[in-house]
Image (tube, rainbow, N blue to C red):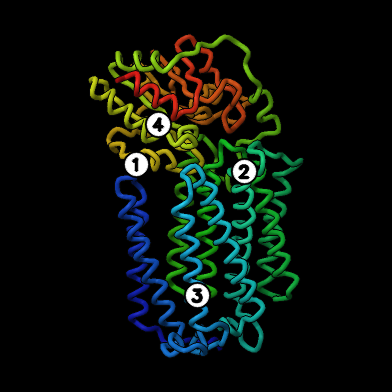
Amino acid sequence: MEHTAPVNPWVALAYLIAGICFILALRGLSSPESSRRGNRFGMIGMGIAIITTLVTHVPLGGLSGAHGPAIALHGDFVDLVTAGEILVAIAIGATIGLTIARRIQMTAMPQLVAAFHSLVGLAAVLVAGAAFLNPGAFGIAEAGVIFVQSRIEMGLGVAIGAITFSGSIIAFAKLNGNMSGKPILLPGRHILNLGVLAAILALVAYFTQDQAPWIFWTITVLAFAIGFLLIIPIGGADMPVVVSMLNSYSGWAAAAMGFTLHNTAMIITGALVGSSGAILSYIMCRAMNRSFISVIAGGFGAEDAGGGGGGEKIDRPWKRGSAEDAAFLMKQAEQVIIVPGYGMAVAQAQHVLREMADKLKEEGVTVKYAIHPVAGRMPGHMNVLLAEANVPYDEVFELEDINSEFAQTDVAFVIGANDVTNPAAKTDKSSPIYGMPILDVANAKTVLFCKRSMGGVGYAGVDNEVFYQDNTMMLLSDAKKMVEEIVKALD
């Protein structure tokens, strides 16, 4: 019989309050305006969950003593680590997290998120491995035989965790520039992916009947492999969806391990993160005209011919403008729509951009910001940057709300956004971004396109035909430097 301990009503209440805080955190994070409040709720909820877990799993005497058991499962104390060691580990982790949070640049935030996802996945793998090697310590076995339900939880947890870890490592490498952002297409990759996934599911089912070590470790190895195979065929233009998808995977991995550890808070938190990440991935897939099932299978938007010809430069005339030209055109306009992209993030130009917008508004110009769902390298990247610069929330619009206004707009000011404004997404079936909705900046009376040089292309490696239109003026410079010069010219 499985050993169970009476459920403490105060513990259940604490975990319930923590769960409510996590729900309020997700609600707050749905909007830049309420994101700070959402973060506070998340911190409060996590604090309650950690303290409750420590109090219920660490004997009160162990908190002050140098020795003594620090982990208790189902009423049986297991002398794994001391309470002091747990507190030291928490302090080390908190110090590392605080240091990274203070030093990290916003441009590096996507790869940081991918790195954190990998740690969640690795933690799930380590917990599952520990539970398999010593099931008695986790109260999931009797006479050395692991309970069937625990084998299911363990098998799924280690599989999802390993996929999250290896997939997040690839995402980090692509976002950080350690690996090419172009799709790496393996022959027969779809059949290979489906075959490996089918093998993992079959082995998990077999694991419920036989707990032989080779089954568990084969599941782990195959899951690590499929994580790599799922992400390497995905190009840089689709990386925001990958980050969202891996976020969902990390949540489900945590939930599965919550069952193994019999920790309600982990189950609740993991389920919330997993479901919210899946919903966000689905919304983004619809915004990009992608198949949600294809996202899960891996390699979406990357056909064997994809990207061929897309990255070639178009050799045709283009017009170059100056900061003075841009200032004059925008000063005379009735409405200017600003389209920020990753180039703005790299240059950290959001603050001076808001200053430029303020000066235009003083001249009676209506200023709006158009945000593409996948602008930047992660969902909401541009929204966070603009919020950091105190841009009013009522001036920021999503693609579906503002796209129709470009045709009646005097000036579209594009700053570091290439792929999300590229008409090839509508016209070139061989393009890796084909089918992705874009911001129709080309329809504006004048397009001011700010980028470093004509030699560079977007993250997807596709040249942009907007550069060569008669109504486009190229502003070639570092984004922050160019906007600063425009601000001076407006004065």
Mark 4: few/some/many CA within 10 Å (<14, 14-19, 20+)? some
Q: Check residue 399 in the rendering and tell me which mark sits there, or answer none.
A: 4
State the SS at label 3.
helix
Quadrant containing the C terminus is top left
**310 left or right of 7?**
right
Q: Which residue is mark 2?
A: 174
The amino acid type, in three-letter code, at marker 3 is Val
The amino acid type, in three-letter code, at marker 1 is Ala
Q: Position of residue 23 (x, y in %)?
A: 35, 59
Mark 1: few/some/many CA within 10 Å (<14, 14-19, 20+)? some
State the SS at label 1.
helix
Q: CA distance from mark 2 to mark 4?
A: 26 Å
Q: CA distance from mark 3 to mark 2?
A: 34 Å
The amino acid type, in three-letter code, at marker 2 is Lys
Q: Check residue 88 in the rendering and tell me which mark sits there, or answer none.
A: 3
Nearest to the observer: residue 199 or residue 80: 80
Q: Is residue 294 visible?
A: no
Mark 2: few/some/many CA within 10 Å (<14, 14-19, 20+)? many
Q: Residue at x 44, y 22 (%)?
A: 440
Nearest to the observer: residue 203 or residue 268: 268
Q: Position of residue 304 (x, y in %)?
A: 71, 33
Q: CA distance from mark 1 to mark 2?
A: 26 Å
Q: Which of the two marks, 3 or 1, is nearer to us in this view?
A: 3
Q: CA distance from mark 3 to mark 1?
A: 36 Å
CB under 8 Å between discs 4 and 1:
no
**364 left or right of 79?**
left
Q: Which residue is mark 1?
A: 387
First reached walking from the N terminus: tag 4 or tag 1: 1
Nearest to the observer: residue 349 or residue 265: 349
In the rendered image of this protein, does residue 3 appear above or below residue 328? below
